[in-house]
Image (cartoon, rainbow, N blue to C red):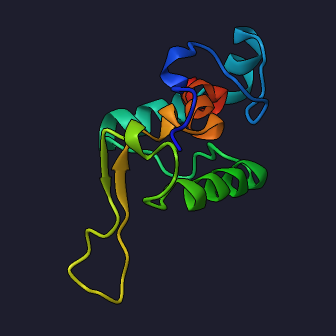
């Protein structure tokens, strides 16, 4: 069975996992401070920026558990899919590209205002 819909055909959020707020609200809530921008310019990174809440993490983890199965009906939509890239058989390193085409959470993460701003 193949997945009926390729979410790459949707150019806006398809779920309510991430808040839909105005650009002004997002800017005020998620913009970086001047100190953060200056730190980034000097060192090239920032830490401690929370992009996902606990509910969003749990939802994305659930979706990942489903789509990492090779038999998932959306598997053909991945650009790359490797079930274990680890040289150690006791560790699993799942690698794939294209999650955003398959599940609403990974698709909508592209519009997460915490990430976009």
Measured from the top left, where is residue 86 in percent x and y? 26, 75
> In percent of the image, x 57 and y 26: which residue is there?
5
67 versus 65 height, above or below:
above
**Image quarter of residue 30:** top right
Residue 60 x, y percent position in the rendering:
63, 51
Q: Is residue 71 above or below residue 43?
A: below
Residue 21 found in image quarter: top right
Left or right? Give the position of 35 relative to 83: right
Residue 81 on image: x %, y % = 32, 52
Q: How many marks?
A: 0
Residue 107, given in percent of the width and then of the height, sits at 56, 31
Which residue ends up furthest to the bottom in the rendered image?
Answer: 90
Left/right of residue 22 with respect to residue 86 in the rendered view: right
Q: In the figure, is residue 106 to the left or right of 85?
A: right
The front one of 12 and 34 is 12
Looking at this view, is 25 or 57 the one in front? 57
For the C terminus, the quadrant is top right
**Of residues 14 and 50, which is closer to you in this image?**
14
Q: Is residue 33 visible?
A: no
**Residue 109 in view:** yes
Please, which residue is most extreme toward the left here? 87
Relative placement, left or right, of 32 versus 28 is: left
Q: What residue is at 39 percent from the left and 41 percent from the top?
A: 76
Residue at (35%, 69%) from the top-left corner? 93
Q: Residue at x 58, y 62 (%)?
A: 65
């Amino acid at each position: 069975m193949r997945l009926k819909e390729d979410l790459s055909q949707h150019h806006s959020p398809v779920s309510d996992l991430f808040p839909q707020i105005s650009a002004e609200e997002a800017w005020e809530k998620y913009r970086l401070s001047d100190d953060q921008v200056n730190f980034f310019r000097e060192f090239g990174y920032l830490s401690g920026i929370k992009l996902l809440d606990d509910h969003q993490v749990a939802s994305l983890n659930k979706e990942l558990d489903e789509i990492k199965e090779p038999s998932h009906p959306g598997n053909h939509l991945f650009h790359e899919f490797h079930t274990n890239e680890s040289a150690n058989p006791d560790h699993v390193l799942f690698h794939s590209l294209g999650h955003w085409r398959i599940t609403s959470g990974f698709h909508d993460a592209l519009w997460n205002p915490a990430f976009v701003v």
